[in-house]
Amino acid sequence: MDLNNKVALVTGGGTGIGRATCIELAERGAVVAIHYSRSAADAEETKRVILNKGGHAVTVQADVSQDQEIREMIRHIVQQLGTINLLVNNAGITRHIPMSDLEAATEDVWDELYNVNVKGMFFCARAVSPYMLKNQQGAIVNIGSIAGTTGLGSSLPYAVSKSAVHGLTKSLARALAPYIRVNCIVPGAVATRWWEGREDQMKQLAPNLLLQRISIPEDIAKSICSALSQESMTGQIITVDSGQTL
């Protein structure tokens, strides 16, 4: 699929992988809807970068864990931009809890992470799918994590939620075929603000990776855009981790 002039929604588009993806999409000619939940200033900065490069972008706000807010956001985007062709389900949250501390993985933590990381992705996919089906063409990329593959991560509920994202990808690919392709990009360690306060850990990790480098958001953004473009691929879980899981 040629991304030029396509309308793309990127959830969590204000920072990190989301920001890099918004910019990469705009550079490939897409019109970008930059979603944010609370980080309005970050989303506006992403928009400013795109506009300064000659691209076209708007910002939209919603709590992805709330189905009605998502539906209203999608209607607003369609009113502004005409349709939605592409969705990048990037918004996600975590809690840093030792894996062995099962008592700290409370019901509230499970609900919070699942509501955003899993249900939120489903809500977004469901809300955009009628417009993609009408166009008889669309592409969705969910952002997973190697935590969902290895079982390790910032917390046990986070790892399980990302494993669920991988499963959601396969189920949506079946449910939305043949007109909508759904794939999942699975990053390893990426140099984003999630590492704030733990930069020394990141520096220690890099030499132990096969490629001896931590991915940057732009690396992941390029993989996302490739998956959006690839018309013969759906239901795939694609790991981008500098060899971290080998």
Image: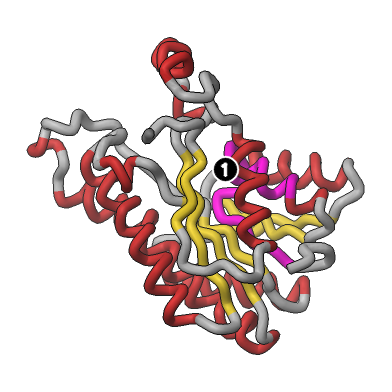
> Quick check: 61 above or below 157?
below
Q: Quadrant of the C terminus?
A: top left
> Quick check: 98 above or below 150?
above
- At a point 31% along the width and 50% down the height, the residue shown is 113
Q: Is residue 203 left or right of residue 181?
A: left
Instruction: Please state the horizontal and vertical placement of residue 182, each as a whole percent of the image.
Output: 52, 68
Question: Label 1: few (<14), some or many (≥20) within 10 Å?
Answer: some
Q: Quadrant of residue 99?
A: top left
Q: Is residue 25 visible?
A: yes
Name the kind of residue labelled 1 in the image: Ser
Instruction: Please state the horizontal and vertical placement of residue 37, each as a whole percent of the image.
Output: 52, 51
Decide which of 69, 129 is in the foreground and name it: 129
- Badge 1 element: loop
Q: Is residue 131 magenta?
A: no
Decide which of 183, 107 is in the foreground and name it: 183
Residue that lies at the very extreme toward the right in this rendered image: 54
Q: Is residue 163 left or right of residue 198?
A: left
Q: Is residue 11 magenta?
A: yes
Q: Is residue 66 visible?
A: no
- At a point 66% along the width and 89% down the height, the residue shown is 134
- By what rule are the colours in the image chosen? secondary structure
Residue that lies at the very extreme toward the bottom in this rendered image: 134
Q: Quadrant of residue 14?
A: top right
Instruction: Please state the horizontal and vertical placement of residue 221, each as a whole percent of the image.
Output: 64, 45
- At a point 64% along the width and 75% down the height, the residue shown is 138
Q: Which residues are magenta?
A: 7-24
What residue sits right under mark 1 in the picture?
39
> Quick check: 91 above or below 70?
above
